[in-house]
Amino acid sequence: MADPRDTHEDILLAPIEHTGPGFYWAVAFLSLLILWGAIAYSIQFTEGLGVTGLHQPVGWGFYVTNFVFFIGISHAGTLISAILRLSKAEWRRPITRMAEVITCMVIFIGAGQILVDLGRPDRMLNVLRHGRYQSPLLWDATSISAYLTASLTYLYLPMIPDIAILRDRLGKRKLLYSVLALGWTGTEHQHRVLNRAIAIMAVLVIPIAVSVHSVVSFVFSMTLQPSWHSTIFGPYFVVGAIFSGIAGLILTMIIFRKAYKLHYYLKPIHFRYLGQLLLIMSLLWFYFTFAEYLTGYYGAEPEEMKVFWAKFTGPFWPFFWSMVLCNFVVPLACLASLKRHTVGKVMIASAAIVVGMWLERFIIVVPTLSFPRLPFPEGVYLPTWVEWGETAGSFGLFALFYLLFTKFFPIISIWEIREGRETSLKEVEERIVSYLPGEVEEKT
Amino acid sequence: MEHQPPVSDRLVRTLQWVWLGVAFLLVGSIVLWIVGLIRAAWKLDDVLSASVGISIVAIPVFLVFMGVVFYVFWGIALHGRGRED
C-alpha cells in the first residue's frame, strides 16, 4: 500500500514543531488584554459590583450579553460539525476540528461570565447545594454541563488518530501523546469502534446544542417582562447562535489560514459554501427578528411599546440599527451573488455578523431592564472600564486558549483528510450513482 | 528535533486509567448533583415533578456519555491493539 502520508501534512504539524516570533507577539498582545480583564475583575471582586455600570433596574449588562453571545458562538463547532458529518458533506474535513475547538473554548468563557456577574462568586456554591429545578437558570446550568461534556468528548474522539501520529512522529511530549492516543495503531477494529462512537456523539450533540440555546432563551422568555415574554425566543436564539457560530468559525479559519499558511487545505470553495450557509442564516435571522418585532408592535401593549420605541428611535437606536446593518444589510450586500463569494467578501460579512450578533444580545438584555414592567424608576445602562476590561479579557482568553491548542494538536484533522483521499472518493461516486435513476436493489 | 527516551508502557497505561477515572468522576459528580437536587425537592416538598422531569432526560444523557467514553477506552485501548479482523 502506498504511503498515505500527504507531503503537505508537514504544514499541519509545523505549528506544533516550531514556534515563530509571531506566536510570541500574539501571546504578548493577548496577555495584555487578559491582564486588563484580570485587573478589572480584581477591583470588582474587592470593591463589589458598584464599580460597574450595573444598578437598579438594569442588573444585567455586558456580562450577561457576553454570556449569551459566547454560548451562541459555541454553536459554531459541535453543531455545525455534527450536521456536516451526519449529512456526509465531504467538504467538512478540514473544518470540523477548528469548529469543535471553538465550542469547547467558548463554553468555558461563556459560563465564566455568570461567575463574574455574580459579584460574589462563592455564591455559586448555593446553586450547587440548594438549586431548584423550577428556575430556568438551573436548566441552563444542567444543559450547559451536558453540552460541555458532549463537546469535549466529541472534540477528543476524532483527535485520537491524530494524537497517535504526533506520538509516532514528534520527538517531544511523548508521555502526553502516548496517554491520550489510547494505544491507537490504526487497526480495522479500532477504526470501527471510533467511527461508531463518533456517530453516536454526532447524533447526541445536535439535540443537546439546540436545547442549550433554547434554555438560554428561557431565562428571558419565562419572565413576564416586555419584549422577553415570547414563544419564539427558543428558535430565535438557536438561529442566532448558529448564525454567529458560522461567522465566528469563518473568521477563525481565515486567521489561521493566513497565520499557519493553510491555503492548501482551506480553499475558496470552503468559504464559498460557508458563505452560502451564512446567507441562508442571515435571511432566517431577519425573518425571526421581523416576526418578533411585528407581533409586539401589532399587540401595542403599552409596556411593550416603551421598549419597542426605545430600540427603534429612543436611546438604543444606534445599537438596534447597527445590528440590522451588520446582521442583514452587510451580509446581503456581500453574499447575495452566490457565484461571487470571494474569501474577502465572506470575511467582511462574518466580521459584521460577529459584531451584529453581540449587539443583538445587548439589545435583547438591556432595553427591557431599562424600562421594567414593575413601577421601578427607568434607567439607562452605561458600562464602566471594568466591564470593558472584563469583556476584552474574555475575548483575549478565548484567543489565547485557541492559540495554545494549536501548539499541541493539529488544527486540521490529518486522518480525516487521509480518509477522504483513500476511501471517500470512491464512496461518494457510488453514492451519487445510487441517487440517479436506475435499477433498485431491494434489501429485505 | 529533540528526542526523548521511550515512555514506559506501564506508566502510560496507569495514566490512561487515571484519565478514564477523571472522566467518570466528572460525569458521576454531575449525576450525583442532579440526584441531590431531586432529594432536596422531595424533602422540601418543592415541586418534585420539575426535578424529576428534567432529571429523567438529563441523567440518561450523562450516562450515555460515560458509556461512549468507556466503549472507546475498552475498544481502542484495552482490546484494540494489534487486533485485525
Image: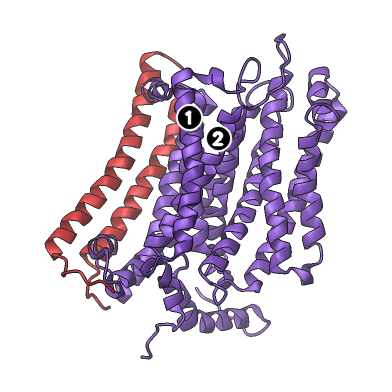
Residue closer to the observer: A317 or A33:
A33
Q: Amino acid at mark 2?
A: Gly
- Residue B80 seen by the camera: yes
Task: Spot the purple chain and give its letter.
Answer: A
- Residue A204 seen by the camera: no
Q: Say the numbered circle drawn on residue A388.
A: none
Furthest-top residue in this view: A375
Q: Residue at x 50, y 79 (%)?
A: A424
Asked which secondary structure carries label 2, the reply is helix
Task: Spot the red chain and give its letter.
Answer: B
Query: Picture coordinates of residue A272 (x, y %)?
Result: 69, 68
Q: Amino acid at mark 1?
A: Tyr
Query: Picture coordinates of residue B76 (x, y %)?
Result: 27, 65
Subunit of mark 1?
A
The image quadrant of residue A136 is: top right
Whether tag 1 and tag 2 are in contact, CB under 8 A, the answer is yes
Q: Residue at x 67, y 25 (%)?
A: A382
Q: Say the numbered circle drawn on residue A389.
A: 2
Q: Residue at x 49, y 24 (%)?
A: A44
Q: Point out the tag, 1 or 2, that comes first from the N-terminus.
A: 1
Residue underneath mark 1: A41
Instruction: Give the colour scheme shown.
Output: by chain
Subunit of mark 2?
A
